Structure formats: C-alpha cells, structure tokens
Image (cartoon, rainbow, N blue to C red):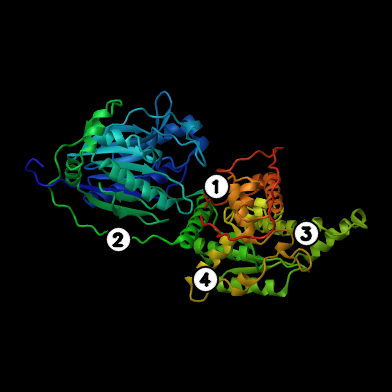
Amino acid sequence: MNGQGPRILRLAMSQINTTVGDLEGNKAKIIAGIERARDEGADLVTFPELCLPGYPPEDLLLKPQFIAANLKALRDLVKHTRGITAVIGFVDRADDIFNSAAVAHNGEMVGIYHKMYLPNYGVFDEIRYFQAGTECPVYVINGVTVGITICEDIWYPDGPALPQALLGGAEVIVNISSSPYHAGKGYMRERMLSTRASDGLVIVAYNNLVGGQDELVFDGHSLIFDENGNLIAQGKQFEEDFIVADLNPDAVFRRRLHDPRRRQEKARYRPTETKKIVISTEPRKDPRPAFKREEIVLLPREAEIYKALVIGTRDYVTKNGFKTVVIGLSGGIDSAITATIAVDALGRDQVVGVSMPSEYSSRASVTDAQELAENLGIRLLSIPIQPAFDAFREMFGEHFRNLKENETEENIQARIRGNILMALSNKFGWLVLTTGNKSEISVGYCTLYGDMAGGFAVLRDVPKTLVYDLARYRNSIDSKGVIPQSIIDKPPSAELRPNQKDTDKLPPYDVLDAILEAYVEEDRSIEEIAEMGFDAALVKSIIDMVDRNEYKRRQGPPGIKITPRAFGRDRRMPITNRFSLELPIRTTSYVRRQYVRRRT
C-alpha cells in the first residue's frame, strides 16, 4: 500500500504440549518456539492459552506464590523477543487475576490482553478463578493491524473480535486457545472459525494447545482462515507442530471495499472505544527464508478417538513420573484394547500384563490373553487367584453357611485381582491401568476396590460399542491384527460364575449404549427415550442403575474425556439424591424399532 508494495505478515503458531506447574519446562518450549519463529523469518509468533503456567492450573491459581512465579517466568521470556513480536498466555495480576495474553516485542512488554468471556460450563470453572477483561485493543505489527483474543472470546459472534475488526480495523484476529477435545469437536471449531472470518471479513488464526492433562486431552489442530472463510493452514492433530503462514492483509482491505454491509454495521455499533497500540508501522522489506507447509489430512472418527486415548495415556503416565504400567489381561475386549493403547503410548517394554485365572476362567480366555501379549510383545505374568479365593471361602465358611453364592463371591474374585495388581504396583512402582468402559461404569457393572482399583482408567469415557469399533480400527492398521479376532467375536463376560454373560444382567450393549447416550449426555426423559424404540420399563431400570451408582463413579480413578459429557468434570450429580424419573403411563414393548445408533 502507499507505493510500498503488498504487505505480508508472516505468522508462526507454536502448537506445544505444556505441563501444568512446570514453569521452567514450559518456558523452555516457548523460548524454543520464539527462536524457531525468528529463524523462519516470522513477524509474529503465538503460543496457546495459559501456556506458561499450563492449562488448566485449577486451584494452583489460589496460591499467590504460583502467580508470582508465573510472572517472573514471563519477565524472563520477554527478554527473548528480540527482533520479533510474541503472544504468550499467562496469568496476570492486578487487583484480581486474569487469564491473559502478553504481547512482547523486541525485548519489551508492549501490551496485555485480558480474556473477556470466561467459560463456566462443562469442564470449565474460569469464573471461580479469574476476573473478566473489559478492553479489546488492537496492535499494529509491521503495518498490519492485529487483534488478540483468548479461546472462548472467539466463540461468540459479538465477542471482542467484532469491535477489533469493525472499529479497530483489525485485519488479523489471533486467538490463543486451550480447547479440550471431544469426538467431533474439531469440525465444530472449523465451522465456527470459518464463520467468524467470513462474517468479520478478517483473517482468523487459531493457536490451540496439544497434549493430555489429567482427564483432558487437547488435540492441537491449530487453524488459519482467510477473510472469505477459507482454510489456508492447519496444524496436526494430537502432535506438537509449528505452523507458518504468510498472511495478506491487503486482500482483507480489498474484500471489505466490496461489502457495504460493514459500513452500515459500523455506523450502528457503539461499544467502548478500541485502543490501537502501534508496535511497528513499516512492513518488512528484507528477504525471508522459504518455508514448507505440510498437507494435513484430518483423522477419521475411530482414528481420532484412538489417538486421543494414546496421547492422554502417555501424558498422564509420563507427566506424573511413571514409566511402566500394569494391566490385568482377562482375555476380554476391554483389557485387550487398553493394553494395545498402552503399548502405542509407552512402548512394549513399559507395559506388563497379568493373567489372573480362576475356576471360572475359560481356557479360551487364558489363551487369548497369551496370544494378545505375544502379539504386543509385552511381558505376561500369570498369577492364578484360585488359592486366594478358596481361602476366602474357607474364612467366611461359618458365616456364609447355608447361603447361596451370589455377587458377594463374584466381587471377592474381582477384589483379589485388584489386590494383586496393586501389590505389583507397590512393589515395582508400576501404575495400574483399569479396564472398565463407560457403559459398565454408568450402570455400576463394576466392583469397587476390585476392577475399579488403579491409577488411571483409559476407557472411562468410552462406551462398550465404541470399544469394539476401536479394536477393529486398530487391527485394520496392522497387517497382523494385534487383537485376536476371537477376543472381538466372543460374547462379553466377567467370568465370575459358571457360563456368565454380561447380557444376564444388562441388555445388549448397542441397546444399553443408546439409552445411556440419551440419558447421560442428553438428559432425555424416560418417555423421550422410550419413543426412540425402547421399552419404558427397561429404560427406567437403566436410569435407576445410573443414578444409584454415582457413589461408585466418584471413587473410581480419573480417565480420558472423549465424549461431550463425561462423568466427573462434565456431569456432576449429587451422591445423596432422592429425585427419580417416573415411568410414563404409556409404555412401549421391549422391541427395538428402527433406530440408528447416533455417533458422537
């Protein structure tokens, strides 16, 4: 413009995996990103939301010394921004604390943006910790006007990006984010960001966190959309990445000239004045190094979820200081997919399987566990539980005389196995991975201090039908098919009594999972679920099981969130609770009508 030739803003987005509280480690990653961006000839480099303290810091934010340490680390970081502008997520402190983005340039702090929209739903509790910001400044960087926003800010059509673009003249909106994953969320983000870009006639650059933190997984998948809403660059899913793109603000100006709606909207819009902070007005003229942009192909559903489980498992284990995990291998589908995920996350040398047969274990289950261990290349220990089970029977003999064996004896077996795994954990420092899935945990088809005993529940948010989908997917990408087909084909059974099948107490899993999705994730009534084609009495019984087993779920280990509404962080129900859904007067027969199981 003005005879200077086209303006180009070279943007670098550093998609990093941070660890909550690891200020020095996170700082080192940010410095490395700044240095790489400078080498790539970038004008501006961005990092995810709260990347310096890690996300989410939760009640660490209530410790003044943590806030102070984060501010000291930021001051150290600012010194590294010679010759470049950087946007870094941190916690700011004034009369309160703020979820903030520091704008540093040439070794100095030139601005701070405070997040304006604080999410307080689902997994988010930001109002518990932060004060909301009130100003939405823009920054002139090498002659290009840039607005800074943080995560939730961009989800609102009338959020700060609107006045930044409309009144502040922002040609680029940067959004630094730590947006937790659930299946299908990436497509939701793409549609939303594309709409923000085209509605605002502005380039939108979205820099997301990647990695696992407790139950949460962040999928990365950073995105840049042009002023027409077209995707021009994106980052990898579930991997650290460095995205570089040359942005063309002159194309934004030309696009705005052709859209008179913007002038009408601007004339009507009267918010707080948008402050403009000038960092540098002259476009860069020195030659820049060429860069390569890797073509990214988005993962299909099962691959996406499987990768989320792998990174969630890997980060939980390694970030908490463990090296090796131990898993009870029953010969069933849940333990098979858990062990496979663990091997893909940590390597075969860091996974130990334990076979713990009893008198009720079928020969096929024992050999299936052995074949799985051989396919995965992991060590398999065999510790039969029969001697311990016989000892328990003898110990309770006088007290249980003339009483029929029931769930008590079944649970004793599960608890013996839990004791064995925890003993191995104590002796060798191994982390126990439990193998229960969301379907079982929902209805309490699990044993406290038995199969629920452990440090991390990989499948806690994975419905049983999805477990089978993941097993078939994992076999499809391996020429050998690591999970024996016999494990996939066999009817599911706890094998705690003769000829036991899960369907003795539960409906088929495709029926159960559809009911659970409708009730747990969508809060539908009995009548609404029955109208989907299920017997109302069956629906009522399933709902009652879900409600009365909240106490079990509360005592279980954490696990990876992959659905829109996971137990714990998302769905928070009281344990002591006398509210119960009532059966409708009109019921249906226990016949499944045409019903296509909806996928998340």
Camera-nearest residue between 298 and 521: 521
Residue 565: which disc?
1
Q: Nearer the viewer, mark 2 or mark 1?
A: 1
Amino acid residing under circle 4: Asn
Q: Mark 2 belongs to which amino acid? A: Glu
CA distance for labels 3 and 1: 31 Å
Tag 3 secondary structure: helix
Q: Is residue 355 above or below residue 580?
A: below
Q: CA distance from mark 4 to mark 1?
A: 28 Å
Which class describes the residues within 10 Å of circle 3: few (<14), some (14-19), or many (20+)? some
Q: Amino acid at mark 3?
A: Glu
Label located before the other in sequence (2 or 1): 2
Q: Measuring from the top left, give residue 537's x and y in whole percent.
A: 72, 51
- Give how far apart the Cα atoms at labels 3 and 4 are: 32 Å
Mark earlier in primary sequence (4, 1): 4
Q: Residue at x 9, y 46 (%)?
A: 5
Real-space CA distance between mark 2 and mark 3, rounded to the nearest whole angstrom: 54 Å
